[in-house]
């Protein structure tokens, strides 16, 4: 079985750094999860006047108003078969601020018709983005949004999301950079940092709420 990223990249998948091939080659048949722990060097973006409105998205683990530097971070990845019978990967992100713990959750699957990764955002998956995938010269993974859909009713070409991840051999960890930008409002959120990851067997106690493991 090929992972959703292997299907999206085709032969380019083998140009990824071996550690990225291991991470993004994970499938539900392996019965493992990835636990990542690290720190975000910086989390910034969104004009001050707009930040209070982001608290609405915080309840859905979609976006949040807090900003800062050297923010502790955890990530859990699960590969599973979703309710539509599709291979999917769940992303459970947690950012630990001094007075709040914020989430940014998502689930990705490969869309055969769009020939792209579809990212369903938040606990309710009310927003989806279509992501094109590529590999950098250094063997890093590149994701760039093509379009955004709100509750399957409105299709937007903005804001745009870009994601880049590569493996730092000196640190033996993954470096991530995420940037969400609006043409009028500028950077809505940007975070980057270093994440150490380990593969763990899935047990009934750590199966995510979304999806059904095959």
Image (cartoon, grey):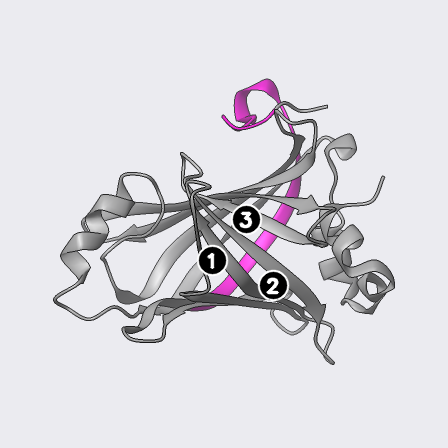
Q: Which residue is mark 2?
A: 173
Range shown magenta: 192-211
Q: Which mark is residue 119?
A: 3
Pick whichever of labels 2 and 1 is earlier in the sequence.
Answer: 1
Q: Which mark is residue 100?
A: none
Q: Residue at x 45, y 67 (%)?
A: 160
Nearest the viewer among 206 and 196 is: 206
In the rendered view, does 115 fall on the left or right side of 83? right
Q: Residue at x 47, y 57 (%)?
A: 38
Nearest the viewer among 172 and 92 is: 92
Q: Residues within 10 Å of mark 1 (few under 14, many from 20)?
A: many
* The image quarter in which residue 103 lies: top left
**Contact check, label 2 and label 1, Cβ < 8 Å:** yes
User: Label 1's element?
Assistant: strand
**Contact check, label 3 and label 1, Cβ < 8 Å:** no
Pick whichever of labels 3 and 1 is earlier in the sequence.
Answer: 1
Q: Residue at x 32, y 52 (%)?
A: 63
Reply above or below: 177 against 113: below
* Separation (CA) of disc 3 from disc 1: 23 Å
Pick whichever of labels 3 and 2 is earlier in the sequence.
Answer: 3
> Which residue, as the protein is rendered here, is positioned at the far top?
204
Q: Residue at x 76, y 67 (%)?
A: 17
**Which tag is nearer the camera, tag 3 or tag 2?**
3
* Residue 177 at x, y percent in the picture: 50, 69
User: Label 3's element?
Assistant: strand
- Does the stretch in magenta take in 202? yes
Q: Which residue is mark 1?
A: 38
Reply above or below: 62 against 42: above
In the rendered view, does 19 fall on the left or right side of 63? right
């Amino acid at each position: 079985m090929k992972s959703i990223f292997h299907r999206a990249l085709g032969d380019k998948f083998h140009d990824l750094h071996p550690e990225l091939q291991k991470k993004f080659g994970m499938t539900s048949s392996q019965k493992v999860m990835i636990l990542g722990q690290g720190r975000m060097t910086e989390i910034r973006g969104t004009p001050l006047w707009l930040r209070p409105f982001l608290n609405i998205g915080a309840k859905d683990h979609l976006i949040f108003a807090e900003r800062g530097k050297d923010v502790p971070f955890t990530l859990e990845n699960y590969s599973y078969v979703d309710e539509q019978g599709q291979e999917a990967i769940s992303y459970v992100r947690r950012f630990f601020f001094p007075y709040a713990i914020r989430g940014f959750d998502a689930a990705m699957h490969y869309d055969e018709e769009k020939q792209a990764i579809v990212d369903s955002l938040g606990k309710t998956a009310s927003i989806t983005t279509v992501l094109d995938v590529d590999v950098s010269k250094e063997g890093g993974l590149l994701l760039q949004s093509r379009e955004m859909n709100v509750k399957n009713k409105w299709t937007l070409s903005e804001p745009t999301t870009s994601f880049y991840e590569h493996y730092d051999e000196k640190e033996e960890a993954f470096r991530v950079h995420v940037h969400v930008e609006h043409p009028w409002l500028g950077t809505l959120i940007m975070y980057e940092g270093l994440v150490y990851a380990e593969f763990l067997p899935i047990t009934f106690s750590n199966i995510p709420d979304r999806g059904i493991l095959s």
